[in-house]
Image (tube, rainbow, N blue to C red):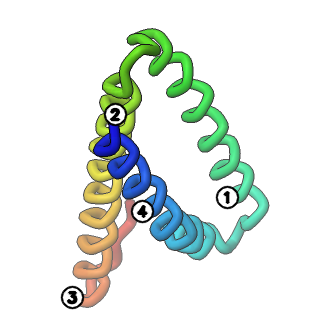
């Protein structure tokens, strides 16, 4: 059980370190409509939390394994979204540097 607590500590610490940066990046990207971006971020967090909680309980309450599985799947999906966003942004910058106008 101590390993479970250590893993949870690391996950929560990482969340506390990276979450403010993610919110800052999202706010910067949507600076034209800051209220809408803030509402989307808050609503998205609420929706994902509301979906993840019963999902963990569905797989059992006697072990930390369901929570770990949901956290791992969420991390994998977040990483995929970050890579996709980074790839799209870097392609847009590359086309702008090359003198092309990107409309997409």
Distance CA(mark 1)–CA(mark 2): 29 Å
Residue count near mark 4 (Cα–Cα under 10 Å), binned few <14, some 14–19, many ≥20: few
**Closest to the observer: 98 or 41?**
41
Could you tell me which secondary element the residue under label 2 belongs to? Answer: helix
Q: Secondary structure at mark 3?
A: loop
Of callouts 2 and 4, which one flags the residue occurring earlier in the amino acid sequence?
4
- Mark 1, residue position: 37
Q: Dot 3 corresponds to which residue? A: 98
Q: Position of residue 96 (x, y in %)?
A: 31, 84
Above or below, 17 against 74 in this view is below
Residue 48 falls in which quadrant of the image?
Answer: top right
Q: Position of residue 71 (x, y in %)?
A: 38, 38
- Is tag 4's residue or tag 3's residue first in the polypeptide sequence? 4
Question: How far is disc 3 from disc 1 in space, using C-alphas?
Answer: 30 Å
Of labels 3 and 2, the one closer to you:
2
Q: Which residue is mark 4?
A: 14
Tell which of 90 and 70 is nearer to you: 70
How many labels were placed on the picture? Answer: 4
**Mark 4 residue element:** helix
Q: Earlier in the sequence, mark 3 or mark 2?
A: 2
The CA distance from mark 4 to mark 1 is 23 Å
Q: Earlier in the sequence, mark 1 or mark 2?
A: 1
Q: Nearer the viewer, residue 71 or 99?
A: 71
Identify whether 34 is placed above or below 45.
Answer: below
Q: Do callouts 3 and 2 mark residues in contact (Cβ within 8 Å)? A: no
Q: Secondary structure at mark 1?
A: helix
Callout 2 environment at 10 Å: few (<14), some (14 to 19), or many (20+)? some
User: Of circles 4 and 1, which is in front?
Assistant: 4
Residue visible at 52% across and 64% down in the picture: 16
């Amino acid at each position: 059980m101590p390993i479970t607590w250590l893993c949870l500590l690391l996950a929560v610490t990482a969340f506390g370190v990276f979450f403010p940066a993610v919110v800052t990046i999202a706010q910067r990207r949507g600076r034209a409509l800051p209220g809408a971006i803030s509402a989307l971020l808050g609503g998205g967090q609420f929706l994902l939390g509301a979906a993840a909680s019963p999902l963990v309980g569905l797989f059992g309450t006697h072990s930390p394994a369901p929570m770990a599985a949901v956290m791992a799947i969420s991390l994998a999906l977040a990483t995929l979204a970050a890579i996709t966003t980074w790839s799209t942004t870097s392609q847009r910058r590359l086309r702008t540097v090359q003198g092309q106008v990107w409309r997409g």
